[in-house]
Image (cartoon, helix red, strand yellow):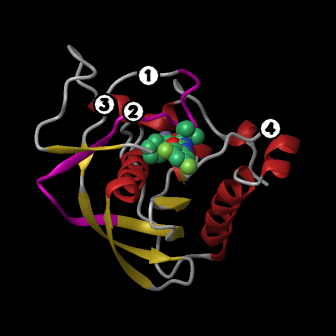
Amino acid sequence: MITMDDIVREGHPALRKTTDEVSIPPQQEDKQILEEMLEYLRNSQDDEICDRYGLRPGVGLAAPQINVLKRMLAVHFTDQNDRLYSYGLFNPKIISHSVERSYLTSGEGCLSVDREVPGYVPRHRRITIKAIDLEGQEVKLRLKDFAAIVFQHEIDHLNGVMFYDHINQDNPFKEPENAKPIDR
Ligand code: UDB
Ligand code: ZN
């Protein structure tokens, strides 16, 4: 199983690389890695397993964070309406997004970043994603608010981008233009 020992931290070159597309249909080996990434998220949200293995509770994980330079990500969380988003995705692509933005009022963190980085991270408020799921089927997801933020954070990792790259350098808490604040 994946533990915090497998998650690379800030300074590791994998976090700044761009990643390769996964060949479709997905190979068993790639599926296995992606299933383990999703399992990490589920385990990390189980109090007992989390305590036993010293996991940090996560809502999303991208392959470069375990030093695998492929376009794969996992998410596991519920939104404000209790809808569960639990996916392992290959080759996710944002096919459209709103002009309107959003940002978490508490800022963002990262499983690969062991420090607090204060500031607002502007994201697209709504996105539509196309990807291949663990069954090898094409999926299209329409996402907004927190869900859209999680997917954008993870897709950024596939392009070597960290959340703090988006924070305004001069004024980290400058209100992004045309953006909805999200409390969570
Ligand atoms: C997270 N978790 O998993 F508002 F129920 C973060 C960490 C870095 C704090 C563990 C998180 O935001 N959990 C959370 C937040 C809520 C309500 C709630 C749980 N990630 C994933 C990550 O690092 N992926 O690479 C960071 C998030 C920041 C914004 C979206 C993803
Ligand atoms: Zn992250």
Q: Which residue is mark 2?
A: 107
Q: Which residue is mark 1?
A: 117
Residue at figure coordinates x 36%, y 29% from the top left: 164
Magenta span dominant secondary structure: loop
**Badges 2 and 1: C-beta atoms under 8 Å apart?**
yes
Element class at badge 3: loop
Task: Give, as a single range, the part of the protein colored magenta.
Answer: 93-115
Residue at figure coordinates x 66%, y 67% from the top left: 35
Q: Which residue is mark 3?
A: 120
Q: Is residue 106 left or right of residue 65?
A: left
The amino acid type, in three-letter code, at marker 4 is Gly
**Badges 4 and 2: C-beta atoms under 8 Å apart?**
no
The amino acid type, in three-letter code, at marker 3 is Tyr
In front: 175, or 151? 175
Residue 106 painted magenta: yes
The amino acid type, in three-letter code, at marker 1 is Val
Q: Is residue 148 left or right of residue 9?
A: left
Residue at figure coordinates x 61%, y 35% from the top left: 8
